[in-house]
Amino acid sequence: MARQKGKVTMEISFKKYINGKDVTLKGAFSQNNIIDYVIKIPREKAVRRVYLILNSDEFYEEIKSDCYEFIWEDLEEGMDIYSLSVNLSKYKPDIYFINICFESFKTTTYLYDKFDYRRQLTIYKENNETPDIPKGIMYHIFVDRFYSSGKSPVKKTSVLNPDWDNGTPQFSKKPGDPLKNNMVFGGDLYGIAEKMDYIASLGTEYIYLSPIFEAYSNHKYDTGNYMEADEGFGGQKALKILIDTASRYGIKVILDGVFNHTGDDSLYFNKYSNYKSEGAYNSKNSPYFKWYNFRNFPDDYEAWWGIEILPRVNSADSDYLKYICGKNGVVDKWMTMGISGWRIDVADELSDRFLNEFHRSVKSKNKNAIIIGEVWENASNKIAYNLRRKYFLGEQLDSVMNYPLRDAVISLIKDKNTDKLINTIKIISYQYPDKVKSRLMNLLSTHDTERIITVLAGKQLDNNDNLLLSQTFLTDSQYKKGIKAVKIAYALLYFMPGIPSVFYGDEIGMEGYHDPFCRRPFKWKNTEKNPLLNWFRKLGKIRKTHSAFHCEDLMIEYYDNQRFILSRSDKNEKIIFGCNLSDFPFHIKSDSLMTNLFEAKNKGKNLVINPNDFILIKINPKGLIEI
């Protein structure tokens, strides 16, 4: 109800309920649900009929529509009350688009404009194959750069850089130029197992490894053999030791599945005849020939983004599917060894058939295994290669990498404006299913991006000048500013529904521009004296031990251009994240005692958030925050 020019103007009230619970701020539901809609309309608007229009996916030319008429229920305090129940079981899992139509004697109006995000209705297949909501964090490790045990050999095709502390990764003149990518620093799977005390101290629940399958390069995104762990990383023995060691700490290991392409130097393509197999490049009679798309055999073939060393696989090919997803296949082998899930590289480029089969194969081995897709945009309605993707309909991905949130957090801190963050939170909260939101891989740095401290505090440089990027580091003043910004960014990330993902080294303030400079070796010298590391450990403990972080919902309590307050709650507690990016103190108060979670001290019922700072506090589960 808003006051204008002395008059009371009543607005339309639109609510949605499932089993009596208010779900108005959500738009993704199981087929098993019945949605109860309630609309209250001021009698002065003279509305005579109300309809819900439900369209099939409007991306495609042929649109099918259902029209439901609301039932008038009552007149209450000048408001006509209408209701409608829609049983979603009559609809197949898919994306739909709705609108509410108000018909009066003179006009017809609609609740939403054409591009309103709330028009999207996602109906998904319910299943019991979703992993438990994570309580800890994900620790993302680029294997060659984390820790060297000294137990693994340097392969004949690799060149060792012995300068772990100060060495610079191999780089080309500019991104995209040819590069061997065979310089290694010697990090291995044994080394990760040896550092498990350290990894566990961060509150880790998942270790996500960069690719570990046999491959020529240091990064292993050019798979040579899916059935072998790379000997330079210690091979299968080292992987098994890592899995078993992690398990004793209650930590799960997930692998990076690169299934859209292989290496040209592989068992399957074998361009250089380094394998004994008859690869697709060698003969049209190769058992792997149908995996690839040749335009003019053998040298003209489809490759990922035109990069010849990465020939693209036809992921819908039956033989390929059997090799990856069938009995005694790739999934079967590594799941049997004990891994707990997969991150799927470039999920947008894999066929629906592949993702469906992959999901079936993984869940048949372990229904609690997690499948996370690499998708850089809104994954609920992503269109790739002129097809609407079906990631969240119940038979493909458990969740995705949350790049939209990363973009929003960076915008928040660099621009000192809340608009993008609040809008991103609203859209994800509405369009992603609850079970997806609570398992999102929330990230700020990855092997594919600049380090977050460099993004937030570094100088923006020419990304095409790799020599300049390799030699540029933060000044002392930039670094100090960056540490403060990193704390705000990561505190917010840990607060959000999903799994906070820390790229190895972010917790000690490692910096670096884009790949390969974000992939420098971990700086182990004096690590335990690093105050940022202790801060991350405390944050990880807070995240793991407070039950409000283990639920699915988040509420926006307040926001303006430079300040905002979010909350998460369950029956035990309400956790508040408040942020102030303005130049003035931000005063808040509560009707219950506020406890600072970093200090574990009561702060009374009044609190000040200093300029360019944040708070993380706990209040009574039914407590209220006021500005």
Image (cartoon, rainbow, N blue to C red):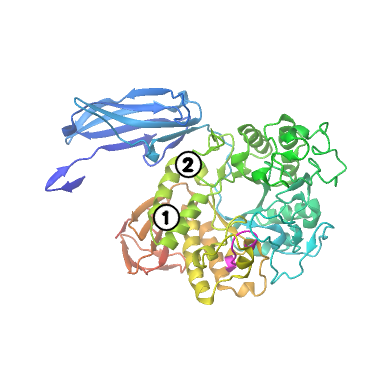
Q: Residue at x 45, y 67 (%)?
A: 600
Q: Residue at x 55, y 73 (%)?
A: 531
Q: In the rendered image of this protein, does residue 152 appear above or below residue 556? A: below
* 514 magenta-colored: yes
Labelled disc at residue 376? none
Q: Residue 546 or 582: which is nearer the viewer?
A: 582
Mark yes or no: residue 136 visible.
yes
Q: In the rendered image of this protein, does residue 148 appear above or below residue 91? A: below
Residue at which label 2 appears: 432
The magenta span reads 507-517
The image position of residue 144, as x and y in percent, is 72, 60
Residue at the right extreme?
Answer: 276
The image position of residue 312, as x and y in percent, is 69, 40
Q: Residue 553 or 56: which is nearer the viewer?
A: 56
Q: In the rendered image of this protein, does residue 309 appear above or below residue 358? A: below
Residue at which label 1 appears: 573
Main secondary structure along the magenta-highlighted residues: loop
Q: Quadrant of the C terminus?
A: bottom left
Mark 1, Cα crowd under 10 Å, few <14 / some 14-19 / many 20+, is: some
Q: Quadrant of the N terminus?
A: top left
Q: Residue at x 20, y 47 (%)?
A: 2
